[in-house]
Image (cartoon, helix red, strand yellow):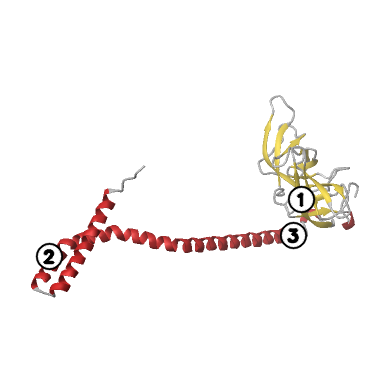
Amino acid sequence: MRVARPRRSRRTLVIVAVLVLLSVTLITFDARSGTSRLTAGIKSVAHDVFAPIVAGVNDVLRPIGDFFAGSVHYGALQQENQLLQATIGQLRLQLREVQGEAKQQEELHALEGLPYLASLKTVTAQMINFNVSNFDADITISKGRDQGVTVGEPVVGAGGLIGQVTEASHTTAVVQLITDPRSSVGVAFGPTNQLYGQASGQGIGKPLAVDLVPAGTPLHKGEKMYTNGLNDAQYPQGIPVGSVASFRGTVGGGSMVVTIDPLADLGQLAYVAVVQWSPGL
C-alpha cells in the first residue's frame, strides 16, 4: 500500500529543488559572463523573490534539525537523569537508616529507669521476629534462659505493658502480646486506682476489651488503666496498660462495654525489657 506524503513536505521539497536549480544557473551564468549589471540585476531580483521562500523553508527545517540534535543528546540526558535518581534513592535509604538507628537509641534510652518498675530488675532484649495470625499475636526476642529470662515474666516497653513470656530457649524467648486473644490482664483505674476490670486481647491492631466494669462507673476517654497487682496476679502493680478508647452502658445490663488502646506502641517494637518478676514476689 502506497502512503502519500503530506502536501507540506512535497511543497518544501519542490521549493528546495527550485532554489538549488536557480543557484546552479546563476553560478554557471556568472562564471561564463563575468559580473555585469545584468547578472547583478538577476541576482537582486532572485534575492527579492526567494528571500521569503528561503525564510519559510528555514522555519520548516529548523525544528527538524532541532529534533535530530535533541535526539543525539537525549540518551546522555536520560543517563544523567537515571544516575541522579539512583543517587537520590541512596540518600533516602541512608536517611531512613539513620532515622531508624536514632529511633532505636531513643527506645533503648527510654527503657532505662522506667518509673513504674520501681526497683525491679530488667533484661533488655531486641525483637527479632513478629509473629501474627488470626489466632496469635506474639514476638520473638533475642534473650533467653541463658540471660535470665523465664516463662511467666512480664515484658514492657517505654509506653507500658507489652505482654508476657510464654516460651524460653537458651538464647531466645517468645512473648505473647496483650492484644493476643488468649491474653488477659487485671487492670485498675479511677482517681485512686481502686476500680477494677479485666482487659482481654481481641487481635493485633484492635483495642483491648475491658470486662467486669459495673454499670454507671465514671469513666472518661483517655483515662489510663494499670495492672492491679492483686493476689496471684500475673503482673506487678502499676504498669500502664492502656487508655480508654470507648465506653457505653448496655440496656438492662449490669456492666459497661469498655475498650482501651495499648499505651505501648506494639507495631513499632525494636527493644523491650523483660521484668525479673513472678507472682508472689
| Left or right side of 43 for 205 | right
Secondary structure beneath label 2? helix
Q: Is residue 122 left or right of residue 221?
A: right
Which label is found at residue 129? 1
Question: Crowdedness of circle 2 by 10 Å Cα count: few (<14), some, many (20+)?
Answer: few
Image position of 220 with respect to 95: above or below: above
Q: Are marks 1 and 3 in contact (CB under 8 Å)?
A: no
Seen from this angle, which residue lies furthest left? 37
Q: Nearer the observer, disc 1 or disc 2? A: 2
Q: Measured along the vertical axis of the image, is residue 146 above or below residue 203?
A: below
| Image coords of residue 72 (percent x, y) | 43, 63
Residue at the spot 76% in from the left edge and 34% down from the top edge: 211
Give the mark nearest the N terminus, 1 or 3: 3
In the rendering, at what x and y percent does residue 62 appear?
31, 61
- Tell me where residue 185 appears, x and y as whole percent: 80, 41
What's the residue type where badge 2 is placed? Val
Precedes in sequence: disc 2 or disc 3:
2
3D distance between C-alphas at marks 1 and 3: 18 Å
Q: Which mark is residue 45?
A: 2
Q: Amino acid at mark 1?
A: Asn
SS at badge 1 = strand
- Residue corresponding to mark 3: 108
Of the pair 63 and 241, the residue shown nearer to us:
63
Q: Is residue 81 left or right of residue 106?
A: left
The image quarter containing residue 261 is: top right
Question: Which is in the foreground here, disc 1 or disc 3?
Answer: 1
Residue 104 in the image: state x and y as whole percent. Answer: 71, 59
